[in-house]
Amino acid sequence: MNDLDKIYKELGEGICLFPFIGSFYKTFGNQEAGDNKSIPNSILPCSLARWDGENESNPWEIEPGTTIADARNSDHYKHTRQKFLAGEWKDLTGCVTCHVSEELSGSSPRMANNQFFAENIEEDIVELVKEIQANGYTSNKLKAMDYFPSNYCNYECAMCQGGASSKRLTFETKYHNVDQRIVFNEADEDFYELLSSLEILGFTGGETILQKQVHQLIDYLIEKDLAKNISITLLTNASNYPEQLIEKFKQFKKVMYTVSIDGTGDVIEYQRRGANWNNVQEVARKIYNTPHIHEFINYVVTSMNILNAMDWIDWMHDNDFKWFSISPVTRADQLSLLSLPNDLRKIALDRLHQGRKKYEHYVEGVDEFNYVRAIDQLIDIINQSNFDPDQLEQFVNHIKIENRVSKKPLHEVVPEWAPYF
């Protein structure tokens, strides 16, 4: 195991390891309906990265004849690595998601990924990064990859976009006049060559276990006797238990499941449309009790669920789920706490401060202290998110459309919102 403190001491507190030893690989894309041009596969420093140039073509696209390895060493990729080692990553507008998350809550995917790599990469990470720096910021060792084969999903979450959910795209087509289609590609040939050097392979989407490509790749890794050397991660909405994969999971070095649960009862059924709370609970508990699977819960903070956040904390505690993360919603400012009016902000804070008293007996250093830390993080996110009336207006308009197809309108799910509708 690598020492994360050493990594930060040697490479800087602002380092993100993903651009150096990892990549996000995508084999499909959105296209305007009627456009028959081909869409290249793409590769990014991470799933949240965005091109930070103006009026520039997408540098992440893998044009025919270009290998994934070459795409990872484009000038922009090298520039990104250089900025991180210079301690100037906040200048990269493509990294705005982590920048904002850390300002709001003191945590971010960057920090979580660094911790994950430190725990699961066997090679000396500091030496790997220094070797890349000495080699003109060129990386010849791919140790981790997140693979995004399709947007196939059975949920149409209110904070999602069609590119990440096929069902959401159907909703957007009908209610937002989105005129797009999804184009699927085969994986590039050198994708399979790179798998032999991976230590971590992450599956994302879409709902991962519903994607045929995920099943095919798991079978491929087992067939080629690579599974034993690889830790895999999967994102799931807990709509289905991966019964058909359990025996296959045992052949991998480690299996980590990130389960998206950001509310209880009617709240999660509203925010993650398609969810059935009783089923979600059952699946989450079953995954938790499955040998060979390490479960991690992720909570996305929005103005839809923040007033009931203590219900989620209590549910987590009652079910002994100690490992989880909290993330402010991104790419949808109208759903963030910027849209939360001051009277509702006070209610949310009062509930969190009152609820915190139940957990104050836990001390730092024990796993149960994570509940206290989570409450404090939610409080910080509220306090750091300044109310914006324009975002509230956009929130109300957004929710009115969501209400058309939800089992209950938001103001019935969260009655405190009723005066605004």
Image (cartoon, helix red, strand yellow):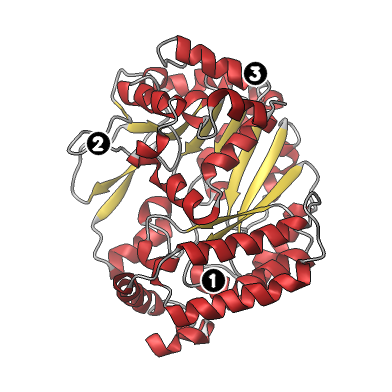
Element type at mark 3: loop
Q: Nearer the viewer, residue 15 or 411?
A: 15
Give x and y (percent) for residue 151. Answer: 43, 49
Give the residue pinned by disc 3. Answer: 124
- Which circle's residue, 3 or 1, is located before the other in the chain? 3
Depth check: give the residue in front, 9 or 163. 9
Residue under the image location 37 percent in, 51 percent down: 163
Dot 1: element:
helix
Instruction: Name which of mark 1 and mark 2 comes first in the sequence.
Output: 2
Residue 184 visible (yes or no): no
**Residue 172 picture location, percent across and down:** 32, 64
Compared with residue 380, is residue 235 higher up or lower down, i.e. above or below?
A: above
Q: How much space separates mark 3 and mark 2, taking CA atoms?
A: 33 Å
Quarter of the image for the N terminus: give it.
Answer: top right
- Work out whether residue 247 can be spotted: yes
> 375 or 49, which lies in front?
375
Name the amino acid type tagged 3: Asp
Camera-nearest residue between 417 and 67: 417
Q: Residue at x 65, y 24 (%)?
A: 223
Q: Work out whether 267 lies above or below 240.
A: below
Q: CA distance from mark 3 to mark 1?
A: 40 Å
Q: Residues within 10 Å of mark 3 (few under 14, many from 20)?
A: few
Vertical order, 1 against 24 (above or below):
above
Residue topped by disc 1 = 306
Q: Which mark is residue 53?
A: 2
Residue ID at (45%, 40%): 47
Please provide percent x and percent y for residue 154.
50, 60
Q: Is residue 233 left or right of residue 418?
A: right
Q: Residues within 10 Å of mark 2 (few under 14, many from 20)?
A: few
| Type of amino acid at the residue the image marks with label 2 | Gly
Image coordinates for residue 38, horizontal then vertical, percent: 25, 35
> Label 2's element?
loop
